[in-house]
Image (spheres, helix red, strand yellow):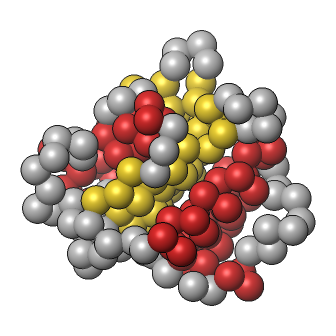
Amino acid sequence: MNEHLIDLTLPAPSLQSDETAQSVLLKILEAMNCRTGTIHRLDPDSNLLTLVAQVGIPAELLDKVNAIPIGKGIAGAAAEKRDAVQLCNLQTDTSGVARADAKKTQVAGSLAVPIINCDDQLVGTLGVGMFEPHEFDDDETEKLWDISRWLAPSFS
């Protein structure tokens, strides 16, 4: 992994601007050696995960990922379980975790983690993916957890 791309000892930038959120996501993807990803923020009023930034999501699927119910899809499952959710190959997965339209992304290996603030409150999700089948190992999963903890203050 290209860990030098993100300095987790420095505060994460505010994700209030679309440009900053997009830039942060691009750095995360590069650090994780991934090609696609999303950052979602939990809207406490609607209890939906709302899209903050995305890379690699086809235009025809943006409506589906703009607002995700807790428990639905990979991001929603990570939020509901408050744990990492991984699919080695989304294209052949039959677990029912991924939505049917998710196959249109052409993503195979995917990993999502919840973003939990210092008050132990769910504030969002972070997801990454590859276009080839991939089982994220413990080090990769822990790295994404580290990044999600780093991002959490940005959601205040």
Where on the picture, by quarter, is residue 109?
bottom left
Horizontal placement of 13 versus 28: left or right?
right
Looking at the rendered image, the quarter that the C terminus falls into is top right
Placement of 137 over or under 76, stated as above or below: below
Q: Residue at x 67, y 61 (%)?
A: 146
Tell me residue 130's x, y (percent).
Answer: 35, 73
Pick the front one: 132 or 23: 132
Horizontal placement of 120 versus 86: left or right?
right
Tell me residue 77's x, y (percent).
Answer: 37, 38
Horizontal placement of 125 versus 120: left or right?
left
Q: Residue at x 59, y 39 (%)?
A: 124
Q: Residue placed farthest to the front in the image?
A: 138
Q: Residue at x 62, y 86 (%)?
A: 2
Tell me residue 29's x, y (percent).
Answer: 54, 72
Looking at the rendered image, the quarter that the N terminus falls into is bottom right
* Count of numbered labels shown in the rendering: 0
Q: Is residue 106 visible?
A: no
Placement of 79 over or under 102, stated as above or below: above
